[in-house]
Image (cartoon, grey):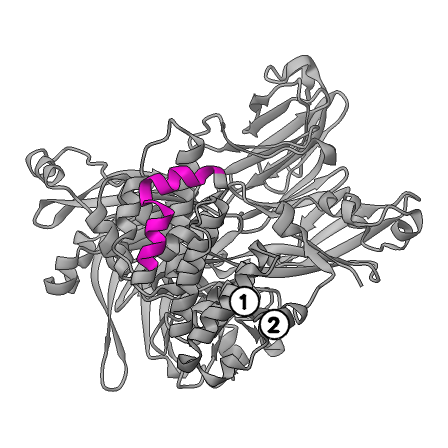
Amino acid sequence: MAYNDIVVATKNYLKTISIDQGVNEYPYRDLSWLRNSSPITYSSFSSHFNSFVFISQDGHAYNAQFDGEWRGHCLHSPPNHATVSSFNEQFSLISIGFIDGKVVNYSLRPNKQSPVQSHKFPEKPSVGCVKQLSWTHDGYALAVAYEKAWSIISVYGRVLVPTSDDMLSFIPNSSQRTHKFQDRHIWGSSNICWGAQSLELYLLSKHSDYSHQIFIIPFAKSAVTTQHSPDNTRYAFLQMSDKLLVYRGADQSDLSVINPESDVWESIKIPLAYLGSQSPIKYSSISSDGKFIAVAGQKGLAHYSTKSQNWKLFSSEVDGQSFSVSGGMVWFNHILIASVVTNTNTYQLRLYSRDQELSSRLLLHTENIPSRILVTSLFENALLVYTADNTIHHFLITPTQDTVALTLANIISFQGLVSNPTRVRGMSWMIPPSQRKLGNPVDDLTIATIIFLIDGKLVLLRPRRIAQDQVKYDMQVLSDGIEYYWTHLNGIGALENSLWGVDGGGIRLWLDALTLTQSEREKTRINSSSTVQIVKESVRIELDFYPLSVLMDKGILIGVDHEASLRSNLPFVIYRIHTNTHLFLHHTIRFYLTRGLLKEAVQFANNYSDLIYFPHTLEILLHSVLEEEADDVQSTVLLPLVVEFLDHWECALQVVVGCARKTEMSRWRYLFDVVGAPRELFEKCLKTHQLKTASSYLLVLHHLEQLEGTDDAFKLLHKALIESDLVLSKEIIRFLHSIDPSGFYMQKTMELIESLTSTLPANMTNDPPNGLSQLDEEDEGLPLERSYSARRREGLGITVEEE
């Protein structure tokens, strides 16, 4: 079928209208694959796959092709009626919406094979039927218009924007308030679509008086969706229609990183001089140190320095219009390497210096490439270029005195391994440590493990040399449903050569994708034809936000989620991007402990023991294991090994009591049966001068009714007074006052203080005798805010603020 043909579905016919052949009619009764000859009421078409999806009046969904005659098959049959459909060409998916609010995705297969069901998005019957589906141009997100709401969902199921009806419960139920509220789109949209480069969402809202309004909502997207390169995945790097956002939390203190209220985003405006003529921006790239940024629109490019805060554009309009970026851009120190296609359809790698003006006359190097460039990745001084002829070109970058040399080191074809090169969205490699330290860099490509992200499949290719100049690859599909991934070749400890995949629910972590056991090496050596599939997922991390990057040295995952705010005095919704963090250390430690690898767990954790929130990480580990085992008698008993692991750290006593105070008392018996009696731990705290921790154990003993009168409290108070810990002393005095309102314990306290008066600081003896006034003053100074976050309470991403 020619792409300028028209397909029309009428009550009884499927018609094709073309310039050459005129009008051809195909009666429904003659289409054997169309059940019940039910009329077609909705259709969608993909020019990339030359494929249609038809929805019939009785709720069936069909996939069909036309090559002179119609061929098709049924994808779905009632009772659940299909309503709409949409193609995701970037991920090879067909999405079908249903009358009950469900969305089901089907994977398109090569050679005209029938699509198969891939995954479903959660249904929500309260929002009504699906009215429209619209995928972003890059295929990473789906906008869903329901009868009574709208929502945004990532390609493999992460809810990026919850259904808008969640906000309705926060709008006062009064006709006057509802009438004044202007953002009518939250009650539903009859149509929905994305703007240029999917950075603006257009919603068509229908009012009760049958009038219509169009709402435009701006969005930000990860730069990884424009270019899947190692540096872009290293940073939380967002692109909007007119600016870029770069996360700078990695440069902050540990506490600032884990504080979600910290403003750690740098906003960089894209110059209007470039946007005005070259919008929309197709590619964004950041350097490994975060100092340089480049963007590319329809033609040309521009780059920026965070130090000077200056953009550089082509001074000559002819130069800027002579090429377009195709395949991405990467930074090597201050050198920008751009893969371009010229106006004469020549494919090139061009090297620009940030220190010089942007001009074709000042190019450091130009390298012609025989085929269209699809993906570029940079690893230290190695440049990998993947082209449309299914080939990887490996270049070595060598700085010279005056310029930079780009030398072709190797070329490998992946014919027979990758069926469709245009489906490759990401590419990287992992080189064995021995090769990196001692090997010849020219041989790296033939020794490295290659990683491809093909549609949603994360594929590992392991090389085996079968001749002096021939390499065969063993393929393993690590996972399906991956949206993007990170590799960390220089990770900390066991995280060196780690592989992180982002799917619809969270993170999948492979700790060392290069690990081979001795038996597997022997198997490969003896049987050259064997396919060794040995890389297994190590850790699964569930997240309640969308991850953007990992701060390896801080043990933290960084991401964002959507937040919608409503104010009682404003008639519209305020949308925000909210930064979120998640510690990954306890997941990795637990992985080792589950396998009985105590030594490895200690070695890994030791890399992070200096972090200020390291005790909190251990507390999360203990708490998660305790809850599982105390509530489920069938679970694997891991708590004793966790406690043995905690004993390697000075903060172990603090971690145990912190966990106890944050969990239900019904679990205390199981916990203290393993870690030891609370009284023994209390005495241990006194001996090791961990007085603050001992005060927490004092509360535990009180709740367990194991206090020996007031001796324990007075013993701790005595030590606190001796060590001049005034704050702790007052807390203990307050505790004694709370358990004995009669004042008897307070009298004994005063006697103790008087007996130690000569050894106490002068400022302490001047305090009021009950020792409570300072604490009371601090309590009275605490602000009381009349606001609450529904996201914390219900996970809806909605904040309501009262005036």
Q: Earlier in the sequence, mark 1 or mark 2?
A: 2
Residue 529 percent location from the top left of the image: 14, 33
Observer-nearest residue: 396 or 607? 607
Residue 195 in the magenta stretch? The answer is no
**Residue 297, numbered label:** 1
Residue 669 in the magenta stretch? The answer is yes
Secondary structure under the numbered disc 1 in the rendered image: loop
- Depicted 633 relative to depicted 724: above or below: above
Residue 598 percent location from the top left of the image: 22, 47
- Location of the N terminus (image quadrant): top right
Residue 27 percent location from the top left of the image: 69, 18
Which stretch appears magenta? 666-685
- Whether residue 296 sits left or right of residue 363 in the image: it is right
**Residue 779, numbered label:** none
Observer-nearest residue: 285 or 275? 285
Residue at numbered disc 2 = 275
Q: Quadrant of residue 610?
A: bottom left
Picture residue at 26% right of the left edge, 69% below the top: 381
Picture residue at 40% right of the left edge, 59% below the top: 694
Q: Check disc 1 and give the amino acid type.
A: Gly
User: Marks 2 and 1: in contact by CB < 8 Å?
Assistant: yes
- Depicted 49 relative to depicted 255: above or below: above
Q: Quadrant of residue 491?
A: bottom left
Secondary structure under the numbered disc 2 in the rendered image: helix
What secondary structure prevails in the magenta region?
Answer: helix
Picture residue at 41% right of the left edge, 38% below the top: 669
